[in-house]
Image: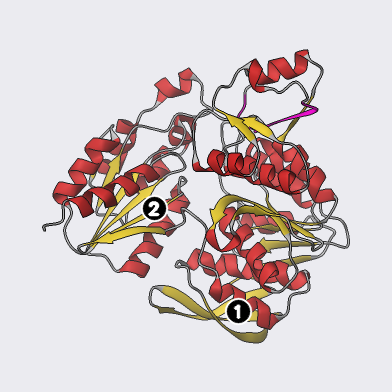
Amino acid sequence: MVGIGGSGMAGLAAVLQRRGARVSGSDRLESAALTRLAESGAHVTTQQTADAVPPETELLVMSAAIPERHPELVEARRRGITVIKYAQLLGALMAQNHGIAVSGTHGKSTSTAWLAFVLRKAGLDPSFVVGAESQQLGGGSGVGDGPHFVAEACEYDRSFLNLRPRAAAILNIEEDHLDCYENLAAINEAFQQFANLVPPDGLVVVNGQDPNCLAIANKLDINVETFGFDAQDTWQAVDLSLRDGCYEFTMRHNGESLGRVCLSIPGEHNVSNALAVAALASHAGVSWTHISEALREFHGAQRRLQMIGEVDGVTVVDDYAHHPTEIRVTLKAARQRFGPRRVWCVFQPHQHSRTRFLLSDFARSFELADYVVVPRIYFVRDSERERQAVCAADLVEQVRATGGHAVHIPEFNTIIQTLVSDLKPGDLVITMGAGDIWKVADELVQRLRKNRPH
C-alpha cells in the first residue's frame, strides 16, 4: 500500500489485516498511523523505493495522491503486479456488505464516524473506514460481524465513483478540489453519478438547505430523504437552543416529533450532520431510542475542535478545517463552545491551488477571529507552477484588505514564540489546516506549561 500512512489508507490497511491479508506499505514520513500498523504486524517503511515492494506481493494499492512515476508503482508494473487505487479496493470490500457511504464537501469524517458509533451502540457491529481517528471507535477503522460497511466517500479524483453503496448521504456540495474539477458544474455532475450508484431499493439522504444537493435529488428515481431546518424536510431540527456551547433540538421525522436531542459536539453544522446520521441509522434499522442516545454520547472525531490543553486560562484546540466554509463554521462553533476573550487562529493553507482558487473566500472566512497567523502553505499534490502562483503572504494581504488582523510567520517555532509572549488568560488558540499544523498546538501547550511560574 503506497501512501499507507494516509487516514483512509491506514484505516483500510487495518481492515485488510483483520480480514487475514498480509499487508506492507510505505509513506514519506514517520507517523502514529505507521507505528500502529507496524505494531499490528504490517511491514511499513519510509523508504519509497522499488525495494519497498516485497517479492511475494500480489496486489499494490495506491492512494489518490501517488503519481504514476512513483518508484513502487514503476516496479509493480515491471513485475506484472496488479495495481489499483485505494477507492477501488474500498469499493470491492463495500460490495460484499450492506454499504453505507457518506459524501459531501464538508463533514464527511465526523458524520461517518458518528454513524459507525450509532450502529455499534445499537449492537449492529458494523465494519467501517473513516478518514479521521475516533477515540470512541478505537481508531479510524474497524471490522465487525454485522452486515453494514460504513465508509467516507471522498469526491477527490472522483474516488467515490468506485464505491457500491446501498445507502448514501450527500451532506453538502461546494467548490473544492479545483485541481481535478473544472468548475462547480463538474463537481455537481460527479455527485450526481455517485448518487446514481445507489440501487432502486436503496436510500439517498440529501441536505434540504443545499440547492446543489436538491438539484441532484430531483433527478433521482430512487428513494430520497432530505434533512434540514424547514418543514418540508423529511428529517427536521426545530427549537434549537445552546447548553454549555452545544446544541439541543427537537428532531422531527415526516412532521412528527421524535424527541429532544442533546449534542456533545458544538456547532450548528453538527445539528445538520446529526440529522443525516439519524436518517441513515433509521434506514439501517436502528430504533429512535438508540439513535438519540448515541447522538448525545458521541464526542467527535480527531482534529475536529479537539481540545489539546488549557494552561493558566489559555485554551488550545486543533481542527482540520481547510476550506473557507469549514473555517467560518468552526470559528463560530468555537466561540459558542468556549466563550473566549480573544480568538487566535493559526491557519495553515492546504495546497497552493486551493488557496489560489478560493483566495477571496478564504480572506472573508476569518471574520470571527481576532488575530490570524499564517505559516507557509502546505505543499502537496501541486505542481511547481502552482507553488509559484500564490504564497501565504498573498492570503495575509487579502485578510488585511477585509479589515482583519493577519500576519505571515513562516516557521512553526517562531509562531509558538510569538503566541507565548502575547497570549493572555481567556484567549483561545485554534490551529487549523489539513497539513501538520497540529504540531503547533501540541508544542504550544508544552511551552505554556513549561513557562508556568513555580
Q: Is residue 452 left or right of residue 323?
A: left
Using residue 173 as the reference point, say whether residue 53 is left or right of it: right
Main SS, magenta residues: loop
Taking the view exactly as shown, the residue that stands out farthest to the left is 454
**Residues marked 1 and 2 touching at CB (< 8 Å):** no
What residue would you read off at disc 1?
A: 293
**Residue furthest right in the image:** 200
The part of the chain drawn in magenta is: 57-66
Tell me the crowding category of disc 1: few under 14, some 14 to 19, or many 20 or more residues within 10 angstroms, Cα based.
Answer: some
Kind of element beneath mark 2: strand
Give the CA separation, mark 1 to mark 2.
Answer: 26 Å
Q: Secondary structure at mark 1?
A: helix
Which quadrant of the view contains residue 297? Answer: bottom right
Q: Nearer the viewer, residue 260 or 426?
A: 426
- Look at 43% across and 59% down and name the residue there: 329
- The residue drawn where x is 45% and y is 30% is 352
In terms of sequence position, does the residue under pointer 1 or pointer 2 come before the other?
A: 1
Residue identified by numbered label 2? 318
- Position of residue 402 measured from the top left corner of the image (x, y, whole percent): 28, 46
In this picture, is 307 found above or below 183? below
Q: Is 324 one of the magenta-colored residues?
A: no
Closest to the observer: 369 or 2? 2
> Residue drawn 74% across and 62% down?
126
| Kind of residue at badge 2 | Asp
Quarter of the image for residue 332 reads bottom left
